[in-house]
Image (tube, grey):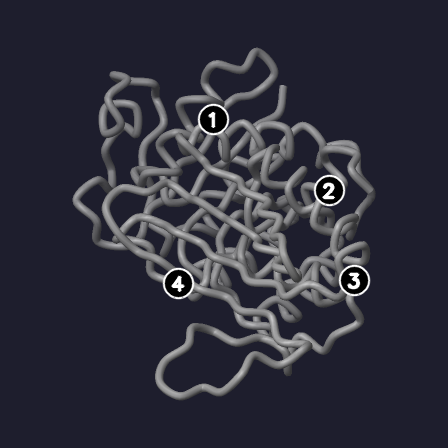
């Protein structure tokens, strides 16, 4: 039985992850964590997310270390916000608990620190900006396609719900990084994030990245390759957050059989590499 802890337990993603874990025959929810001073602290997480009593009480993130040492989960799943997740990851790694991280918005410095922390504490991790199976196939297509269309102009457009706090999305950033790498371009130099005013003609190497926010859009990503006389669009649309949750379940199962200190992504989980 794989014992799992989930942070952001009452949130949109956290609650779906918990509901799905409870349906798995090989998984058990042993801890649910929320931000300090939320009205849900001390309540049964099942009652909070509409399942009835399940015997797991929501704990404060301030008590994370004590909860992990007491419950000893095999894996902690984090889908929260970057600044909070950094401290969660530090404590979790120090407690010897493996990590599945779907949080986005980390800076390069934070990501480098996270990777060092995981390796130094010899825990395992799956880190992915988007855990949906289809999105990771989308990434694979972009990797294979970019060199073929090296002389085409590339634009990335992402759209999400009005509550999303970071922009561009982690998925759009990852798409940008994949394409830039395959084309031999410096990711610190070729990105153009939105355009306004007299920006001049498009340069040969630039990759445009654009963010749309509105309504309840779960997540749309389009990569446009525009050439002379034609264009090709690669599109992924998420119609439900369950697509992300399904990937999380695969990541939880995968991580159990990896080596200490190994950091994987969904390409590893899905055998796309």
6 relative to 61 in the view: left or right: right
> Relative to 59, does residue 17 appear above or below in the rendering?
above
Assess whether mark 3 and mark 4 are in contact (beta carbons under 8 angstroms).
no
Tell me which numbered mark, 3 or 2, is placed earlier along the sequence. Answer: 3
81 relative to 175 in the view: left or right: left
Disc 2 or disc 1, which is closer to the eye?
Answer: 2
Question: Residue 131: image x %, image y %?
Answer: 57, 40
Assess whether mark 3 and mark 1 are in contact (beta carbons under 8 angstroms).
no
Question: Residue 110: image x %, image y %?
Answer: 57, 70
Q: Secondary structure at mark 4?
A: loop
Tell me which numbered mark, 4 or 1, is placed earlier along the sequence. Answer: 1
Residue shown at the point (61%, 49%) measured from the top left: 128
Q: Which residue is label 1 attached to?
A: 29
Q: Quadrant of the C terminus?
A: top right
Residue shown at the point (65%, 60%) measured from the top left: 227
Q: Secondary structure at mark 3?
A: helix
Q: CA distance from mark 1 to mark 3?
A: 40 Å
Disc 4 or disc 3, which is closer to the eye?
Answer: 3
Q: Which residue is label 4 attached to?
A: 166
Q: CA distance from mark 2 to mark 1?
A: 26 Å
Towards the viewer: 78 or 240: 240
Q: CA distance from mark 4 to mark 3?
A: 25 Å
Can you tell which mark lies on residue 267?
A: 2
């Amino acid at each position: 039985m794989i014992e799992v802890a989930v942070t952001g337990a009452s949130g949109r993603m956290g609650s779906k992850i918990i509901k799905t874990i409870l349906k798995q025959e090989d998984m058990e929810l042993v801890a649910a964590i929320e931000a300090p001073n939320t009205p849900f602290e001390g309540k049964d997480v099942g009652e909070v997310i509409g399942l009835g009593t399940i015997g797991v009480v929501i704990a404060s993130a301030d008590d994370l270390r004590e909860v992990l040492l007491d419950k000893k989960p095999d894996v902690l799943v984090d889908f929260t916000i970057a600044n909070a997740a950094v401290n969660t990851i530090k404590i979790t790694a120090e407690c010897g608990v493996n990590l599945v991280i779907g949080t986005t918005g980390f800076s390069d410095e934070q990501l480098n620190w996270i990777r060092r922390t995981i390796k130094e504490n010899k825990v395992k991790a799956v880190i992915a900006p988007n855990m949906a199976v289809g999105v990771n196939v989308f990434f694979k297509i972009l990797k294979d396609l970019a060199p073929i269309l090296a002389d085409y102009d590339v634009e990335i457009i992402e759209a999400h719900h009005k509550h999303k706090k970071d922009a561009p999305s982690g998925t759009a950033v990852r798409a940008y990084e994949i394409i830039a790498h395959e084309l031999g371009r410096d990711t610190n130099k070729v990105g153009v994030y939105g355009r306004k005013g007299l920006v001049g003609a498009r340069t040969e190497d630039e990759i445009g990245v654009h963010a749309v926010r509105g309504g309840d859009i779960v997540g749309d990503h389009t990569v446009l390759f525009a050439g002379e006389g034609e264009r090709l669009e690669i599109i992924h649309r998420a119609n439900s957050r369950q697509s992300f949750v399904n990937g999380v379940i695969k990541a939880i199962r995968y991580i159990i059989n990896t080596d200490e200190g190994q950091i994987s992504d969904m390409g590893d989980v899905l055998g796309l590499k």
